[in-house]
Image (spheres, rainbow, N blue to C red):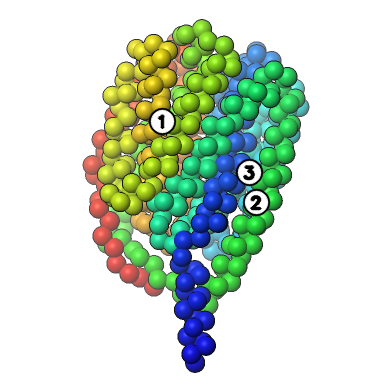
Amino acid sequence: MENTATAATQQNTNTQKTVYSILFSIAFAHLLNDLLQAVIPAAYPILKDNYNLTFTQVGLITFSYQMAASLLQPFVGFYTDKNPKPYSQIIGMIFTLAGIVLLSYAGSFPVILLSVILVGIGSSIFHPESSRVSFLASGGKRGLAQSIFQIGGNTGTAIGPLLIAWIVVPHGQEYIVWFAAIAVLAMAVLWRIAQWYQSHLNLTAKKKPVIVMPDLSPARVVVTVIILLILIFSKYFYIASLSSYFTFYLIEKFNVTVQDAQFYLFIFLASVALGTLLGGPLGDKFGRKYVIWFSVLGVAPFALLLPYSNLFWTSVLSVIIGLLLASAFPAILVYAQELLPKKLGMVSGLFYGFAFGMGGLGSAVLGNIADAEGIVYVYNICAYLPLIGVIAMFLPNLKKNTSK
């Protein structure tokens, strides 16, 4: 009897402690995954020159990628909530690998679209299960875990433009194929994570977990989810203007070189990574509602100043904007997971998918506006988007009760 009790205690400890080795491994996998995704927007100046693309076509590339990455995610998450698939992330990386190789040899606009769709499918498979792994390895430190996971992705997104500037810009589009090695490395890391995930599932198979539910009516939960999605819309529609068109904006307004523009994009994306790291722990300490409120609405004055700034202040403001905006997503995602704790995969897929979708839609719409009115005009109108963050005041404080 004593041995049985000891084993049960050990099992409970194993399934509830913070597993930092897995958190940092999944963050590194996220870095590699999002680095590969960042190849797409970072390569836009090269593709635009090679194929004489319009801004509308550039927007359609982002839209195609983001739609593939967004539409599947909630369905993947819903399925894996009921049927966890520890090795599915490796399958996702195979799609990404195929897309990167195809992009390096793409000779026409339709083939470019096909290649980015494959990368998008890979992303849609990767994110829901990866976010669940982060949640399971958190040991209750959910904001911290989500920030560690997210900073991996944001760091990869920031590194992508630098590698494109160093490897692809001097040599040409075909050198994108070298990024295939990163996909292979990611599969090796994901194999180790999948083994831990499978072991975790085996440990918890005979236990019915205690789930902490928010003390909210179903209608209030639905309204709260809608508010969170509107906040995601304002954040990612604005982010699309910076991630997809910032290099073009700098080149047109300040006459900088492509490589210099990529460097300024890297600075912005690095600030996004740092903001992501801060958002989760701050949400754990001060409450996710207040971090969401501060980060989404707090960016508004800086966004409004950006179109009227010189090159130096544009770079400074882009850093402040990146820090503030990025701190919102870990808080929003963990808030949503705590709102619907029985549907972790679906929630993660919904919010990642919606974020990607809004980024893609924003890129397509803004590309069309840029063709009609000019890229500088895009930044004048986007400056008002963060003001939507005022609706964060309607988010409830989550009081919780326990449910089996």
**Marks 3 and 2, the one that precedes in the sequence:** 3
112 displayed left or right of 232: right
The crowd level at tag 1 (other Cα within 10 Å; few <14, some 14-19, many 20+) is many
Query: Is residue 226 visible in the rendered structure shown here?
Result: no
Q: Identify the residue under disc 1.
A: 322
Q: Are marks 3 and 2 in contact (CB under 8 Å)?
A: no
Could you tell me which secondary element the residue under label 3 belongs to?
helix
Gap in angstroms between the C-alphas marked 2 and 1: 28 Å
Please state the horizontal and vertical placement of residue 261, each as a whole percent of the image: 53, 17
Query: Is residue 96 visible in the rendered structure shown here?
Result: yes
Gap in angstroms between the C-alphas marked 3 and 1: 26 Å
The crowd level at tag 2 (other Cα within 10 Å; few <14, some 14-19, many 20+) is some
246 displayed left or right of 93: left
Q: Quadrant of residue 271?
A: top left
Gap in angstroms between the C-alphas marked 3 and 2: 16 Å
| Residue type highlighted by circle 3 | Gly
Q: Identify the residue under disc 3.
A: 122
Q: How many marks?
A: 3
State the residue in front, 70 or 176: 176
91 displayed left or right of 272: right
Q: Are marks 3 and 1 in contact (CB under 8 Å)?
A: no
- Name the image quarter holding the C terminus: bottom left
Residue at image coords 58%, 51%: 25
Residue at image coords 53%, 10%: 256
Residue 391 lies, with reference to residue 22, above or below; the image says: above
**Marks 3 and 1, the one that precedes in the sequence:** 3
Please state the horizontal and vertical placement of residue 66, each as a whole percent of the image: 55, 35
Q: Are marks 2 and 1 in contact (CB under 8 Å)?
A: no
Residue at image coords 52%, 26%: 266
